[in-house]
Image: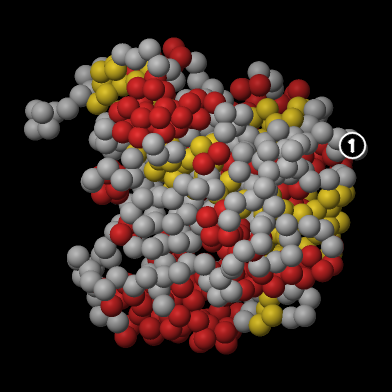
Amino acid sequence: MLILGLGGSIHDFSACLLHNGKIVCAIEEERLSRSKQAFVDASTFRCKAARYCLDYAGVTEKDVDLIIGADNIESRYYARYVPGIRLMNHHLAHAASAFYPSPFTEAAVLVADGRGSYLDRENKIVETVTYYAAGGAEIREIRKVAGRESDDFRNVSNSAGLFYLAVTEEIGFGPMYDEKTLAVSAYGTDRLVEPFRAFYSLDNEGGFSQTLGQMNELRSLIRTELGRSESGGELFRAKADAAYAVQVHLERILIHACRYLHKRTGSDNLCLAGSVFLNHAAVNRLLRETPFKRLYLPPAAGDAGAAVGSALYGHYVLGGHHREALLPATPYLGKTYPAEAMEEAARKAGDFLEEVMAEDVNGQAARLLSEGNLVAVFRGGAEFGPKALGNRSILADAGFPGNISRLNSAKKREAFRPFDYIVLEGDAGKAVPPQGERRFQAHAAGACASGWLDDAESVGAGSADSENPAYRTDPAGPVNPVNPVNPVNPVSLADPATPVNPRGLTTEGTAQMHAISPGLNAEMAALLENYKRITGCPLLLNTSFNLNGEPMVETPAEAVRCFLKAELDVLLMGNKLYRRKKTEGEA
């Protein structure tokens, strides 16, 4: 059975092709349109992601048995498939994306985002949080929280996602940039935590309540606080305090919901989906401060992941298939480009690139990294989801003088934002990022693909299960009952308008570490092994291969263009290494 699943809403469109329950291909529309988050526009009707998946598999629309997507997807995105497309509930598609690929036979599932399907379109009532119990192929709804949209569509009541987004917008980042709010929260104080309590309430059944009036009052308070601040460091700290406060309360809301869900289901397994759970600091606390022992988070927890969820729902529920073996968890769901295409892209840039001869590209790349070079990696299929996991990555030695500043400059990103790290799975529990930045999240074998989470650094390493080395339980140990962000306020600012780079500060809660095993990504594991052998260090700084405001690169030509524009040092493309030719001024 061949199933085409579509994902998205008014942004983050995507497609997934499923054959007999196995994912053949999945891609986000933004990688093809080259428009970040693929917000709805005139190109939406082209549905490039679906065409990409079909072409990769060598099939046509006529070969597809079922086309399915969530019912809140902008209709222009699936217009070419009307009337044959089947539409399903948005939160159910999210739940399916989290439970079906998980290693659990049963689990509690929590879905939380900004807004989901309309429950009453005339009165603008939408779902915001849904609680499920799952087992076998069944996903059963336990409770649903709904909210009302404001007339201008900007706010939604009872929405944890819109609560956070309201702060993101008011402190100046705009929609879809909640990760910047999380980063800034590391610099905040608890000054606004208590005032924020007035803007929502929790009920006895794990629910969260916030009126449209309270959202407006929240926005008004932030504007007042920012208005009292002069430009420069004082304004930055006011924004950081607002970010810190909303982070504290989001974590409180989610912990409350998960404790209720555990009480209702009795399960030790928790699956999460929805854009709220892209907030990795909040996710980290759920294992430590709820009764759940195991957790699965899909690599694309946001709306793009609904393409996978709807396709799997079509297979298991509509197709009536028994859920037998666990699906192999991999985030590398894009197509692999042939060596000829990569060599052609390099040839076209021959005036700017020169090949670095190497018998072992992973060994040579590790050597170049140890010497302080910034190395871009393009090989294998692209990662599905927002995180780079070694196939579309820029790597660097974080301890090498000047590297972090160079990367910030190359990607034109704000100095307050942390970079992630990539590490060998066997070293994930003991590796400590350099320069004071502490790890807050690690993914055991399967990395973001399987979503296995532990907090080995802060609460001790978990034990491995004999049948599944990726299995980790949440060990007993000290927890922070307040907030894991552990902010440190810079006492001085190099530039009154820009905070000092947080690499010299403790920014626990804002950086991620992704563990790689040979079973997940043999080439990247080999590179890390070589780097560890050369330097004694098992981890590298890892950031997505793109420029600020752009999606990750998808094609060889885009990889070469981005590499040159960012003025990086080395490009590892396929099984070859290329060095950027230096200009006369650099020579």
Say which of 390 and 414 sits in front.
Answer: 390
* Residue at (68, 43) in percent of width and height: 464
Image location (x, y in percent) of residue 482: 55, 75
* Residue at (43, 83) in percent of width and height: 191
Above or below residue 56? Residue 276 is below
Q: Which color mode does the image show?
A: secondary structure
* Residue at (66, 18) in percent of width and height: 58
Say which of 8 and 475 sits in front.
Answer: 475
Image-based side of 112 in relation to 546, left or right: right
The amino acid type of the residue labelled 1 equals His
Image location (x, y in percent) of residue 423: 48, 40
Q: Which residue is mark 1?
A: 322
Asked whether residue 92 appears in the rendered view, the answer is yes
Say which of 17 and 364 sits in front.
Answer: 364
Picture quadrant where residue 499 is located: bottom left
Above or below residue 241? Residue 351 is above
Q: Quadrant of the N terminus?
A: top right
Image location (x, y in percent) of residue 390: 48, 34
Say which of 359 and 450 sits in front.
Answer: 359
Image-based side of 99 in relation to 513, left or right: right
Q: Quadrant of the C terminus?
A: top left
* Residue at (23, 71) in percent of width and height: 492
Asked whether residue 344 appears in the rendered view, the answer is no
Picture quadrant where residue 85 is located: top right
